[in-house]
Structure formats: C-alpha cells, structure tokens
C-alpha cells in the first residue's frame, strides 16, 4: 500500500482498502497516510498514527467523501490464489513450474512407463 501511494499523482489521495491492513516488519518508515479499511491490525494502526496519518472506517468514508473524490481503491494481487499455480505451461515440460492435478504422486501415477 505504501508503494502504491507513493506513485506520481497519488501522493495527496486517500487509500481505500476493502479488507484488513496488517503490519510488515520489513518496512522501516511509514509515510503519513490517510486510510479507510474494514479492519486494521493494532500494530499497523500504531505505525500509521505515529507517522501522523489517520486510519478510519467505511462509515466515516461515507460521511467524509460520499462520492469518493480524492480516494484510491486498492486491492491485493489478483493471481495470489492457489488455483493459479495450475495454469501455464504443461506440467513435465522443460522450465515449467506448473502444479499438476493428480490423485497421487506415486510410482504408478502419471509417470512415464515403458
């Protein structure tokens, strides 16, 4: 979220996250952010408030900006689901990291025979 809010043209806008904001130990400094989210973890909220930002709920978003002016709707990675591991080059071909759909991975199941 911090990386997205540093993009050119998005500096003064408000982040809207439909989900939970959690903390990341890899981030050393948190910029001043105004965030609307369904939930915020306690440590993430402390970091945001310590940087001079605000963490608010969707009820307050409806009162502050009913039309959503000056807000940016953020979402997580679209291909983060497990099912996407099965898409791509066929399993077993060179340089393929695709996961196969099999009952078992034993000697007699989907192995080259003969």
Image: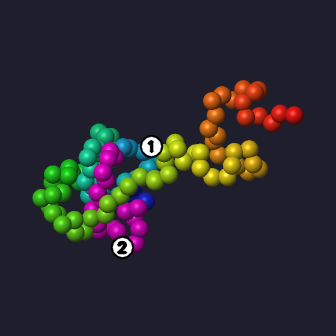
Colour mode?
rainbow
User: In front: mark 1 or mark 2?
Assistant: 2
Q: Residue at x 72, y 26 (%)?
A: 106
Q: Residue at horizontal 36%, vertical 73%?
A: 9
Q: How many numbered discs?
A: 2
Asked whether 63 or 50 is in front, the reply is 63
| Image: magenta residue range | 4-21
- Examine the rendered structure and indicate whether residue 39 appears above or below residue 16: above
- Magenta stretch: includes residue 12: yes
Q: Residue at x 42, y 45 (%)?
A: 24
Residue 51 visible in the snapshot: no
Residue contact at pointers 1 and 2, CB within 8 angstroms: no
Earlier along the polypeptide chain: callout 1 or callout 2? 2
User: Residue 72: x, y in percent?
Assistant: 31, 63
Question: x, y (%) of residue 6?
Answer: 40, 65
Q: Is residue 13 visible?
A: yes
- Alpha carbons under labels 1 and 2: distance apart: 27 Å
**6 or 15: nearer the viewer:** 15
Which quarter of the image is occupied by the N terminus? bottom left
Q: Quadrant of the C terminus?
A: top right
Residue 52 sits in which quadrant?
bottom left
Q: Is residue 54 above or below residue 100?
A: below
Check the image and name the residue furthest to the right. Answer: 114
Tell whether position 69 is magenta.
no
Check disc 2 and report its element: helix, strand or loop: loop
**Residue underneath mark 2:** 9
Residue found 29% across the figure and 57% down from its top: 16
Q: Secondary structure at mark 1?
A: loop
**Viewed as shown, does residue 6 lie left or right of 109?**
left
Badge 2 density bin: few <14, some 14–19, many ≥20, Cα 10 Å: few
Name the residue carrying label 1.
Answer: 25
- Give the residue furthest to the left: 63
């Amino acid at each position: 979220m911090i990386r997205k809010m540093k993009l050119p043209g998005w500096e003064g806008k408000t982040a809207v996250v439909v989900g939970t904001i959690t903390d990341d130990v890899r981030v050393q400094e948190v910029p001043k952010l105004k965030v609307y989210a369904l939930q915020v973890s306690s440590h993430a909220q402390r970091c945001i408030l310590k940087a001079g930002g605000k963490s608010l709920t969707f009820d307050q978003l409806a009162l502050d900006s009913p039309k959503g002016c000056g807000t940016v709707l953020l979402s997580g990675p679209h291909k983060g689901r497990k099912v996407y591991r099965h898409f791509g080059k066929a399993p077993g071909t060179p340089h393929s990291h695709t996961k196969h759909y099999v009952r078992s991975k034993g000697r007699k199941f989907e192995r080259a025979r003969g």
